[in-house]
């Protein structure tokens, strides 16, 4: 089992460019999450999904969109990147909700110039 | 406001020594508390999850304690190894809420 994988590992964007981060999990988990991690701060939830075809906003959703067309994939889109979106992005998945362990991918480091 | 605070911010100890990391939280209604280990450049990995009724939980050389009355938790690492060098993050879940509240972490460095 690969667990949770993320592509790309690293990306540099110019302000205003768009991109999509891909997350895939092979554990048949219902729940998937996108977080961002900034220096000196705890992880912050961007969007999450409780099942195929469903998405919901987290703590910091502005400037991001997501889609969950297939159970195993969760895509995070940046339509018009801004320097404030420079961060490390982590995808996670879990079998259930609040009482279940979340399993994390290796992260995507994004630099917006 | 739901918050999780960890101390110390960073800690350096010698290999083989024990250490204890602290976590205070103001999350209500409380569901569970987790400790994660995050190696540099990698995603967090779960160490323990404790619910309201659990006071202590161990995972190898890692032992977490929970005092739900004082809203405090600690993570004790016994006989530290170089591979224990990482950030340790305390995370609290509120009942009925998918959103976890993450602490900023304690950066632990083990020196030979």
Image: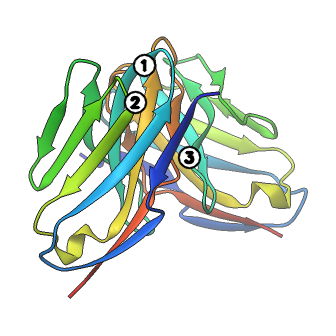
Q: Chain of mark 3?
A: A
Residue located at (22% from left, 72% from top): B83
Q: Secondary structure at mark 2?
A: loop
Of labels 1 and 2, earlier in sequence is 1
Compared to residue A104, the image places residue B12 above or below, namely: below
Q: Which mark is residue B71?
A: 2
Compared to residue A9, the image places residue A75 above or below, namely: above
**Residue ID for mark 3:** A43
Kindly indicate whether the residue at mark 2 contacts the one at mark 1 (C-beta within 8 angstroms).
Answer: yes
Q: Spot the residue most to the front.
A: B70
Q: Secondary structure at mark 3?
A: loop
- Where's residue A87, x and y in %? 67, 59
**Residue ID for mark 1:** B30
Q: Chain of mark 1?
A: B
Compared to residue A68, the image places residue B58 above or below, namely: below
Distance between mark 1 and mark 3 Cα atoms: 19 Å
Q: Are marks 3 and 2 on the same chain?
A: no
Q: Secondary structure at mark 1?
A: strand
Q: Residues within 10 Å of mark 2 (few under 14, many from 20)?
A: some
Kindly indicate whether the residue at mark 3 contacts the one at mark 1 (C-beta within 8 angstroms).
Answer: no
Residue located at (54% from left, 27% from top): B99
Residue located at (44% from left, 26% from top): B93
Q: Residues within 10 Å of mark 3 (few under 14, many from 20)?
A: many
Closer to viewer: mark 1 or mark 3: 1
- Where's residue A73, x and y in %? 49, 35
Q: Chain of mark 2?
A: B
């Amino acid at each position: 089992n690969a667990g949770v994988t993320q592509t790309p590992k690293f990306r540099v964007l110019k302000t205003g460019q768009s991109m999509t981060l891909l997350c895939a999990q092979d554990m048949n988990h219902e729940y998937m999450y996108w977080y961002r991690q900034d220096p000196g701060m705890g992880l912050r939830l961007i969007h999450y999904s409780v099942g195929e075809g469903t998405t919901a906003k987290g703590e910091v959703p502005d400037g991001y969109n997501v889609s969950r067309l297939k159970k195993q994939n969760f895509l995070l889109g940046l339509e018009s990147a801004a320097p404030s979106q420079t961060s490390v992005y982590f995808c996670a998945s879990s079998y259930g909700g609040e009482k279940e362990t979340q399993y994390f991918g290796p992260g995507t480091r994004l630099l917006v110039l | 406001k739901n918050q999780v605070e960890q101390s110390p911010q960073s800690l350096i100890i010698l290999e083989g020594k024990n250490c204890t990391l602290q976590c205070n939280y103001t999350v209500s209604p409380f569901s569970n508390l987790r400790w994660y280990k995050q190696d540099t450049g990698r995603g967090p990995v779960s160490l323990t999850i404790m619910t309201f009724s659990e006071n202590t939980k161990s995972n190898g050389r890692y032992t977490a304690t929970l005092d739900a009355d004082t809203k405090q938790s600690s993570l004790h690492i016994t006989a530290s190894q170089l591979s224990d060098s990482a950030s340790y993050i305390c995370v609290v879940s509120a009942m009925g809420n998918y959103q976890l509240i993450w602490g900023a972490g304690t950066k632990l460095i083990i020196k030979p």
